[in-house]
Image (tube, helix red, strand yellow):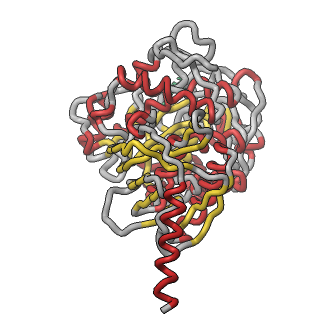
Amino acid sequence: MKRFYFPILTALLVLMMVACKKNVPADLNSVPFIPYPVMVNANGISYVLDDENIIEVANYEELGAIAEYMKNQMQSFTGLNFVVREVKMASGNNIFIGLNNESKADESYELSISKAGITLVAQQASGVFYGVQTILQGVEFKKSEGVWIMPGGEISDYAKYGYRGVMLDVARHFFSVDDVKHLIDLMSAYKLNHLHLHLSDDQGWRIEIKSWPKLTEIGGSTAVNGDEGGYYTQEDYKELIQYANERFITIIPEIDMPGHTNAALASYAELNCDGKARELYEGIEVGFSTLCTRSEITYQFVDDVIRELSDLTEGPYIHIGGDESHVTELDDYIYFMNRVREITKKYGKVMIGWDEVAHADIDSNDIVQFWAKEENATMAVSKGAKVLMSPSKRTYLDMQYDSTTNLGLHWAAYIELDSAYIWKPEELVKGVGKEQIVGIESPLWTETITNSADMQFMMFPRLVGHAEIGWSQDKYLNWEEYKVRLAKHSAYLDRLGINYYKSPKVVWPVKE
Ligand code: TNX
């Protein structure tokens, strides 16, 4: 008889525990999530956190690291204790994360918050990770009751675009491994999943290439304005990839060629057509340098660089630059790009290039990053390539907010928050629709940016709006509603410690 009573007693006990949980009303519909989830359905109540909380995790092998991440984040946000417990299935009265087998969209997740528990399931680990980010944005301290809660209801969510990225120019100014890791953390809070590192330019070469060591010894020593140079060793770079991987972010390395190569041309005389090494460069002009496109040593160089980079790179992409090669003849440019493309393919990688590469013999295996010329995007699509959207007038994070911004440039536009937000990737270039677009990326060029605080000031909160454009459904992309939500959401930016621009376009809450 006893064994019949035991489960009943346990069930009763659980019921009593749940009944003891405080009833704290809350409204999930009014939580200022960014990017806004596809479906949010409030139930008016909430899940109250205890002094000690259990995160139950099924599929521990795939999700254990996410459970630990969640525990650490929740602990540091709330000051409460969390423990991770491996389980077979949800008990129904804790926080549960697990995988399901429903064939839902990549990166999607389902979240259900009742008075008894929180259940987060997804088909892939990335979806669980994004669900955790949603929970982190949702938890709040209820002053009246003196408790931490997660407002109750259902959330069902998935991404509009698969590629949601940021580019950081570490060539004009170098950023340390820790600075980049911090950026990766901030990106993950907004469900961004690609970090493009602009690793070489006229002013600096930032990645160790073992077969061409002078690239970093000489080319890595400088930065704009005589500021300190620097570079990532291959070990540093692997550490970044690992850190990004744990946050479901793919790193894309860019070696900009054949222009923007002065640092390489200064490091090795043989890369110049006249055989003479160039002087190192610390200014901010563009378009004056080029590799020697008809010399075989150039292709040995490119082959070695792409081979070493491909060995390091876990993601599918290598970015080969290709922008503003103003001193390379078009014939030579096309010849060069076609050969570089073959090398990239030989090492099993997908080539991405700035929109000028549309002139080369590209096809459906390549990605063209639109930044300036619409006709290049159109040409790319006519050759079957996909387009990554980085329109300089909307997404360039080094563009000043307005004429009073101290940092940045304004050659493309002044980009206030509304201008950064009110556009859609698929409505930008005629003939380039959702089917042809892989997603959106926001570049931060760093001619005028030297440290992490300034980086954040130029990125935030514009990047938060771009994250929403890349993720959320069209029906939510409404500036009038967004600016109110962003104001409310600023508590979360504060919690993340972000140094963001307090645009006059938004009525920011007055701090108590
Ligand atoms: C144009 S955008 C460039 C960069 C500069 C940037 C400054 C692009 C592909 N090339 O070399 O850093 O403008 O805003």
Image height check: is 435 above or below 64? above
Residue 323 in percent (x, y) is at: 47, 32
Residue 327 in percent (x, y) is at: 50, 27
Near-viewer residue (405 or 392) = 405
Q: Quadrant of residue 354?
A: top left
Residue 468 visible in the displayed image: yes
Q: Quadrant of residue 431?
A: top left
Q: Which residue appears farthest toward the left when viewing the image? A: 431
Left or right of 470, for residue 132: right
- How many circles with numbers are drawn on the protein? 0
Q: Quadrant of residue 437?
A: top left
Q: Which residue appears farthest toward the bottom when viewing the image? A: 1
Q: Which residue appears farthest toward the top when viewing the image? A: 403
Image quarter of the C terminus: top right
Residue 270 visible in the displayed image: no
Residue 278 in percent (x, y) is at: 69, 31
Image height check: is 438 above or below 290? below
Q: Which residue lies at the image location 52% right of the left edge and 82% below the top edge?
A: 6
Image height check: is 125 above or below 359? below
Q: Which residue lies at the image location 39% right of the left edge and 48% below the top edge?
A: 153
Q: Which residue lies at the image location 62% right of the left edge and 39% below the top edge?
A: 146
Near-viewer residue (482 or 5) = 5
Residue 208 in percent (x, y) is at: 70, 49
Near-viewer residue (270 or 458) = 458
Near-viewer residue (390 or 134) = 134
